[in-house]
Amino acid sequence: MIVFEVVSVMPRVLSPVDLKRLGRILGRRLRVRSSKVVGVRFVSSSIMQQLNRRYRRVNRPTDVLSFKVTGHSLQLTGFRLQVTNYLGDLVVCPSYARQSARRQKIDLREELIRSLAHGVLHLAGFDHATKSEEKKMFAIQERSVTETL
């Protein structure tokens, strides 16, 4: 199961039930054996543009950015504590999602769920750099969104 830890104000169109359902579905599709935590922060368009420029060198906002945690360990009182259940962080831009939803004539809730699913798939190692990768990733994404709704 994927557990979403939201660290900002969540858009009103999403509910904790939506996140829990999406987390169960993605966990099943990704064959996650133990719970994996994903941090989520919802940000403004201007903050998303700054982050996209800094981390991807693209000077415009986007729907979601993924930051995977790899080989993470903490130093606590001389002992190393391996953090194995933290998959990474997602930054989501609701205003970008709203524009995208309008263009596609779908509701904002669906587009935000799609952005979260897309981000989690990136954290799990999926990409869409080639047609083959894109087909596989988007198939999992769209089945997960449909099942969540």
Image (tube, rainbow, N blue to C red):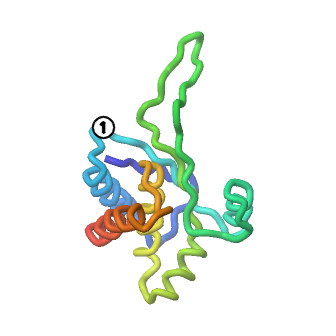
Q: Quadrant of the C terminus?
A: bottom left
User: Residue sitting at 57 percent across and 17 percent down?
Assistant: 76
Residue indicated by mark 1: 34
Residue at position x 46%, y 86% in the image:
104
Q: Does residue 44 sit above or below 24 in this rendering?
A: below
Which residue: 34% across, 63% down? 136
Up/down of 105 relative to 94, above or below: below
Callout 1 amino acid: Ser
Q: Is residue 124 above or below residue 72?
A: below
Q: Position of residue 33 (x, y in %)?
A: 27, 39
Q: Is residue 18 left or right of residue 49?
A: left
Between 131 and 100, the one nearer to me in the picture: 131
* Mark 1 burial class by Cα count in 10 Å: few <14, some 14-19, many 20+: few
* Residue 48: quadrant of the picture: bottom right
Residue 139 vertical position relative to residue 26 in the rendered view, above or below = below
Q: Residue at x 70, y 65 (%)?
A: 58
Q: Secondary structure at mark 1?
A: loop
The mark total stands at: 1
What x and y, as percent, mark residue 16?
Answer: 39, 59
Q: Nearer the viewer, residue 17 or 33?
A: 33
Residue 31 x %, y %:
27, 46
Percent across and percent down for residue 14 are: 43, 68
The quarter of the displayed image where residue 23 is located: bottom left
Q: Is residue 147 rendered to the left or right of residue 93?
A: left
Query: Furthest-top residue in view?
Result: 78
